[in-house]
Amino acid sequence: MAISAKQVMELRNKSGVGIMAAKKALVASDGDMDKAMDYLREKGMAKAAKKSDKVAAEGLTDIEVVGNTAVILELNSETDFVAASDPFKDLLKKLAQLLVKEQPADVAAVEALKFDDGTTVKQALATTTQQTGEKVSLRRFQIVKKEDGDVFGPYLHQGGRIAALVVLQGADEATAKDVAMHVAAINPEFMVKEDVSQERLDHEKEVFKQETLNEGKPAKIVDKIVEGRLNKFLSEICLADQKFVKNPDQTVAEYVASKGGKLKSFVRYEVGEGIEKKQSDIAQEVQDQLK
């Protein structure tokens, strides 16, 4: 049957797909608008599956706190343009609320969880992928719990490019947020020196030893110099011993102690960290589109 331009535009407005995709759906559905919408939804799911080979290295992080439970998560897209879109941001917030409520064990267990409208997370991810035209995926999350006497310190930097979640024993929320801001800015690797593995310590000692010997320092003082450099290195990667970003005259642990608290834990997410981004070949992409 003949498909009118009015039908095509109506379906395009409802679905958000391109003109040719809307026309194809109407032709396949004999002009039935509802069936055409179903057709596009089905194709949207297929499109989402085909995008599994794309690298989603952009996105946003978020933190949701409810009582003594919090979640920190990272949702990825292929470009920062999509990460700034409303469908992406809406899904991120809904996921944060769902995760803190259901507290699943891992990412694999998240897909089967259902939102209040009955939609599964897997379906929601596929729908957002179809809406945005990019692969959207939940990369990671962590559930963090605290005791009644503890405080959470959540902080999002650069609109969610970086998230830091701190737990303090005692002190107050303002102090915890200050520490979270420090974590976001300075990016510590460990809480205290005792958390650093012996293997890592041995490696750094050897590096500092060779560096010191290459500088021509007298052999009798090499060990002392190495010890000093190792201690300085540890103070730079361990949160407790780092100079507090708001007051370098204090370490972070000293700042928290001055507020009647103690460091308990921290988590820091930065969008795309550890992901090797795919380098695009614009000329090749254009050629592929024209085939």
Image (cartoon, rainbow, N blue to C red):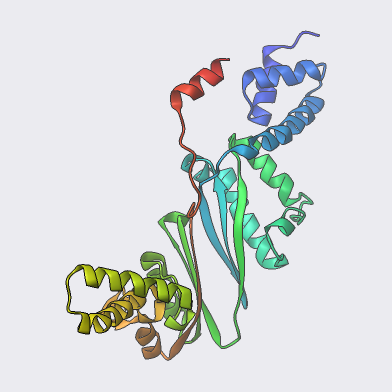
Residue sitting at x 33%, y 82%: 251
Hey, which quadrant is residue 288 in on the image?
top right
Q: Is residue 98 above or below residue 168?
A: above
List x then y, in percent, for residue 82.
52, 41
Residue lying farthest to the top in this orientation: 2
Front in this rendered view, residue 141 or 219:
219
Q: Is residue 161 rendered to the left or right of residue 92?
A: left
Image quadrant assignment for residue 219: bottom left
Looking at the image, residue 271 lies above or below residue 29: below
Q: Which of 215/181 is in front?
A: 215
Residue at x 59%, y 44% (from the top left corner): 87
Q: Is residue 221 left or right of residue 150?
A: left
Is 46 displayed left or right of 287 in the figure? right
Residue 266 coordinates in the image, percent (x, y): 50, 74
Q: Residue at x 24, y 80 (%)?
A: 222
Q: Nearer the viewer, residue 227 or 183?
A: 227
Task: In the rendered view, tell whether residue 151 sits above or below residue 101.
Answer: below
Q: Horizontal and vertical percent for residue 239?
A: 40, 77
Q: Is 57 on the left or on the right of 120, as rendered? A: left
User: Which quarter of the figure is the N terminus placed in?
Assistant: top right
User: Residue shown at 29%/83% (left/top)?
Assistant: 250
